[in-house]
Image: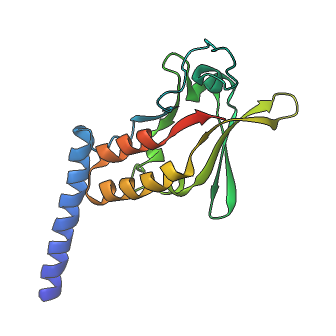
Amino acid sequence: MKKLLLLSLACAALATSLSACKKDAGNGKLDANAKVYISPAPGVRSLDVQAAGQTHLSAIEIVKQAELMYSTLDGMQLEMHIMDLFKDYKNVRFVGSSSWVIMQNGELETNLIRARDYLFTSRDAQKLIPIDTIAYIPNAVMIDAEIKIRAAFSAGDFAACYRLFEEAFVFKPT
């Protein structure tokens, strides 16, 4: 009898948990269809206007020229091709899926926040090889972001997870 009661309570708790996830999806906490953005860091020139003696690319040039995003995770190099559909030229940023932060099943996606050494490169279109590193995300930013995103996720604040991701994933020209 005790086992049946415990099983009933466990089922009720699971049902409540699952309905809470569905409820959260409606109020913006868990949104499997949301977009997240990788934007230029504050102070990075957005437009093509180049100051005298300026050697760095503008943010729009980085968005236009970036073909690959590299990172390192657990000693392995990861590579993500940046297709045109991931580029938002109007708002000068890269577009990603909310599943980069929180998977559709509600679990924290840890690969992107644990990865380090983020580099954006241009690529030789004919040889399909990287030719120049044009931007990066500082490791110190990623280390701090991982701690904060994990804390927000543990607190059940998915909206903060998305916000913290976008605050951390900002690129700087090299």
Whether residue 97 is visible here, answered yes or no, is: yes
Question: Which residue is located at x 36 percent, y 54 percent?
Answer: 148
Q: Residue furthest front?
A: 53
Q: Give the camera-side residue of 122 and 174.
A: 174
Which residue extends farthest right? 127
Question: Left or right: where does residue 90 sit relative to residue 132?
Answer: left
Looking at the image, which is closer to me, 142 or 100?
A: 142
The N terminus lies in which quarter of the figure? bottom left
Toward the viewer: 156 or 166?
A: 166
Q: Quadrant of the C terminus?
A: top right
Residue at 48% from the left image edge and 57% from the top image edge: 110
x then y, percent, for residue 165: 42, 44
Q: How is the image coloured?
A: rainbow
Residue 1, relative to residue 99: is it above or below?
below
Residue 127, image x, y percentages: 88, 33
> Up-down: is 147 above or below 127?
below
Residue 128: x and y in percent read: 83, 35
Q: Is residue 37 left or right of residue 21?
A: right
> From where the camera sits, is residue 106 visible?
no
In this figure, what is the number of numbered marks?
0
The residue at the point 67 percent across, 30 percent down is 66
Q: Is residue 170 left or right of residue 26?
A: right
Q: Residue at x 42, y 40 (%)?
A: 167
Q: Position of residue 134 (x, y in %)?
A: 69, 33
